[in-house]
Amino acid sequence: MQSANQGRLIVFVGPAGAGKTTLAHRLIAASPNLRAFSVSHTTRPMRATETDGQDYHFIGRSQFEQMAADGQFVESALVHDNYYGTSRAEVVRHIDAGRDLFFDIDIQGAINLHRQFADQTLLVFIVPPSWAVLVSRLEGRGSETDQTLRRRLRTARAELQQVRDSSLPWQLVINDRIDVAEADLAALLAGQRSVAATDSDVLLQMGQDANSDPRAADTVVIAPS
Ligand code: 5GP
């Protein structure tokens, strides 16, 4: 049960290219004493642009397995062949200090957090304005191979479907312009705005476009040798 001055878990889920991390950091920068970013542990190799302890705690597989066995993760998942986990101690430390804690995690992790902290968790699905914009943002990054692009689109399609079918109270934020999305999120956090993801025509349309995009299809086509 949530006590009066505890912080909340603000959980951002959405496709790569939706701007979740940028939005979380902008909101935190606006109120740094009241908000913090949940730094997950991962076995994924660190990227050149990342800082250990800031983007993630980068650890080896055996250390991750030991932490999991010791019950140190409030949730953990295997995403794209790497392990990711949220430390229970870190969540408790922030929310007990009255800080809202922002998460950028996969949908399964979000559902797990909601299960454990239902009263304190705000589930937010963040999407670009259309499937076409999502695809062009990913292509525009220049960092995706054909294979990773397909994998991200498959994941996006599955998450769209899961949110649309979910019985959980997902809120929707459309990130077309980042400053507008940030203002929408600020209003959502202040309890001044509510857009249920399941009611959204934009999400319905995106799901339909995803379903008809062959790059997001589940089937693996094996080229004849
Ligand atoms: P990336 O490796 O690109 O930073 O993240 C890959 C995926 O893992 C993203 O969907 C991200 O949201 C998710 N992720 C990052 N940290 C966690 C975590 O602690 N738990 C779960 N369940 N997913 C995470």
Image: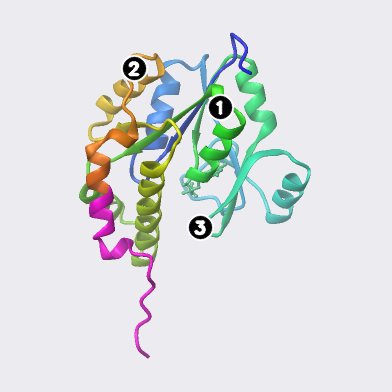
* CB within 8 Å, label 1 to label 3: no
Q: Amino acid at mark 3?
A: His
Q: Amino acid at mark 1?
A: Ala
The stretch drawn in magenta includes residue 223: yes
Q: Is residue 97 above or below residue 220?
A: above
In front: 180, or 173? Answer: 173
Q: Which residue is mark 1?
A: 118
x, y percent for residue 47: 49, 50
Earlier in the chain: of badge 1 and badge 3, it is: 3
- Residue at 22% over, 46% down: 205
Q: Is residue 46 above or below residue 195?
A: below
- Residue at 61% over, 22% down: 94
Region rendered in magenta: 207-225
Which SS class for mark 3? loop
> Quadrant of the image for the C terminus?
bottom left
> For residue 177, what is the image quadrant?
top left
Q: Is residue 105 visible?
A: yes
> Quadrant of the image for the N terminus?
top right
The stretch drawn in magenta includes residue 189: no
Earlier in the chain: of badge 2 and badge 1, it is: 1
Q: Amino acid at mark 2?
A: Ala
- Residue at 72% over, 46% down: 68
Q: Which residue is mark 2?
A: 187
Instruction: Using a 10 Å C-alpha cutoff, classify the residue at mark 3 as few (fewer than 14 neighbours), some (14 to 19) or many (20 or more).
Output: few
Earlier in the chain: of badge 3 and badge 2, it is: 3
x, y percent for residue 108: 52, 45
- Figure disc tally: 3
